Structures are given as C-alpha cells and as structure tokens.
Amino acid sequence: MDERGKLVPIEFGALDFDPVHAFVVTGNDGAVRGGHAHRSGSQLLLRISGTIEVSMALGSDSATVQLDEVRNALLINSPVWSSQTYHGSEPAILVLSSTLFDPANYLNEAE
C-alpha cells in the first residue's frame, strides 16, 4: 500500500483448484447471502470491502469465520454449507469458483 492505494495480486497457481467462474457479491449492512452448499466444487471467498461473517456447517460441525482487515480470504469446499452476513459500508466479496453456475449443484439445506 502506498499513497495511491492498494494492489492485491491473485496468483491462480497457488490455488488448489482451477477457477472457471468468478463473481462479486455485495450486501447491505446486516444482509445475509448464500445459505447453501454445493454438491461438488470449491469456492474461494476474497473480501473486497467491509466485514463478512461466514457461517459454515457440515453435519454436526459448525464454525464461523470473519473476513476483515486481518483475514481476507476463505476456501470453502463442497459439501460445506455456508451463509455470509455483510457488515459495514458497501461490503463485498469476490468469489472464485471451480464450477460454473448451476442451480442443480446447490444443496439448500445444511446437511
């Protein structure tokens, strides 16, 4: 970071998967997004701005991780269920996915 701002490189070779789809998700302060798992694939959540609280569940195990200034990224592998709660001014994440968008790949209930 310098007086002009930040440059944040993303080295795809360092990932455990090959991204084939990317998208940006934004939410108003307090909004909850996600709320599903994927039957297959991986997603890397990269915080762009704000604070994102990520709740995850797999069977009887659950965890919550906060994406913020300290921790900027989180890898979620299938079939982990997750939802994201957005906090702050203009919170946003960039998601890199190993699969293309396909509603048939969604698991809408935490299993």
Image (spheres, rainbow, N blue to C red):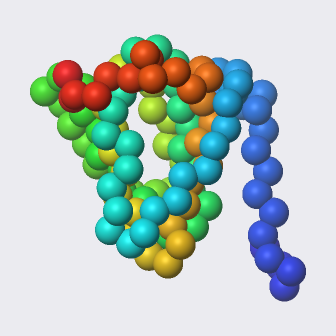
Quadrant of residue 72 within the rendered picture: bottom right
Spot the residue most to the left.
60
From the top left corner, tell me how far across and down residue 16 is, in percent.
Answer: 63, 23
Side (left or right) of 25 relative to 110? right
Q: Position of residue 10 (x, y in %)?
A: 76, 44
The number of numbered discs placed on residues in the rendered structure image is 0
Q: Residue at 80% across / 76% down in the picture?
A: 5
Residue 90 visible in the snapshot: yes
Residue sticking out furthest to the right: 4
Indicate the quadrant where residue 15 lies: top right
The answer to whether residue 68 is visible is no
Q: Residue at left 59%, top 42%? A: 95
In the displayed structure, does residue 85 sit left or right of residue 98? left
The residue most toward the front is 103
In the rendered view, would you say 35 is above or below 28?
A: above
Where, quadrant-wise, is the C terminus in this rendering? top left
Foreground of the two, 20 or 7: 20
Could you say where residue 30 lies in the image, as x and y percent from the top left?
32, 68
Measured as percent of width and height from the top left, residue 8 is found at: 76, 57
* Point 63% across, 43% down: residue: 23
